[in-house]
Amino acid sequence: MSQSKIALFYRFAPLPDPEAVRLWQHALAERWGLTGRIIVAPHGINGTVGGPIAAVKQYVKTTRSYGPFAGLDVKWSDGSAEDFPRLSVRVRPELVAFGVPEEVTVTGAGVEGTGTHVGPAALHRLVQEKEEAGTPVVFFDGRNAPEAQIGRFAGAVVPDTATTRDFVTELDSGKYDHLKDQPVVTYCTGGIRCEVLSALMQRRGFSEVYQLEGGIAKYGETYGDDGLWEGSLAVFDQRMRLEFSDQAAVIGRCALCGGPTSELRNCADPGCQTLEAVCDGCAASLPDRRCGECTRMRP
């Protein structure tokens, strides 16, 4: 059996005809027998695909052959096409749905006005330098809040967000204004959200914003569980989560019994997309469990 891999990728670049790119991408992924999710927008491409490693590499190589995607940022993880139910390639108005496309300017060089990019090693140097200067770095989680239940950077600020659009409301609420004069590092799964989030923060007066280049995925590849990351990484395919080593800490707490868990589970209500940390025991005893919000709204 051939080895399989999952590729997580994105590229911000102006696309004059997103629908043509969508058709090409669908045909390309289908040709190589890949499954996953690909989003194409006027601002670029974002996707996760899985399949035999040779096929995924050929897909990436061919995608990079298109001029605007030459700088495609790719992270690799273990998995296969079986981790996705099907292939989905769609055109969306935004690459990341913050709901403010008018605030995002993209050129051939990427998003304008982003925070300073720092890779994993540079992040460690930054943390040390700021500690020594008496201005500690503040980690700012750029994912939806439920994902942080099972894994996050130590001491991170986790905004109260259920969807990406909630970030603008959170930033405009004033609750993080005390961070505007502090060094803030934004981070997310693969780095794409932070390209936009860091730019939105700078537009709102945050004076020293950095973003973790390559996201948690790249950081985990570099340091495993020997760095500043704690717990598991939530992913949105059949795996639901992944660990960077067998030494990963269990920081999640079951929403039902309060016991330790690294498992995120979907609400059983078909109209709800809420994720909650729920342990194996509670999931087995309550297979039709609905989240707290659904229970409150529809007892």
Image: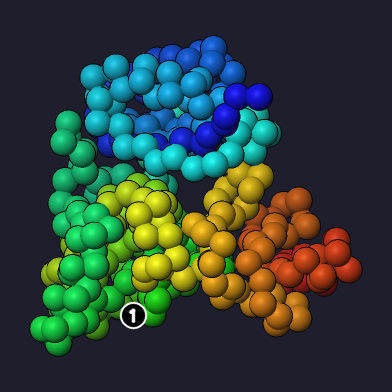
Which residue appears at 62% of the width and 31% of the height? 81
Which residue appears at 32% of the width and 37% of the height? 73
Q: Is residue 120 visible?
A: yes
Label 1 Cα neighbours within 10 Å, binned few <14 / some 14-19 / many ≥20: few
Taking depth in this image into account, of 262 and 16 the one nearest to the observer is: 262
Quarter holding the N terminus is: top right
Disc 1: which residue: 175
Query: Please, is residue 14 above or below residue 149 in the view?
Result: above
Q: Is residue 204 left or right of residue 83?
A: left
Locate residue 91, reporting x and y percent. 45, 29
Taking depth in this image into account, of 161 and 224 the one nearest to the observer is: 224
Locate residue 75, reporting x and y percent. 40, 41
Q: Is residue 218 left or right of residue 138?
A: right
Question: Residue farthest to the bottom?
Answer: 134
Question: Residue farthest to the right?
Answer: 285
Mark 1 lies on a secondary structure that is loop
Locate residue 150, reporting x and y percent. 56, 68
Quarter holding the C terminus is: bottom right
Give residue 17's quadrant in the image.
Answer: top left
Q: Is residue 24 left or right of residue 130?
A: right
Q: Is residue 196 visible?
A: no
Give residue 298's quadrant in the image.
Answer: bottom right
Counting every numbered tag in the picture gives 1
Locate residue 126, reporting x and y percent. 18, 69
Which residue appears at 58% of the width and 39% of the height? 79
Query: Please, is residue 162 above or below residue 49 in the view?
Result: below
Give residue 257's quadrant in the image.
Answer: bottom right
Amino acid beneath label 1: Lys
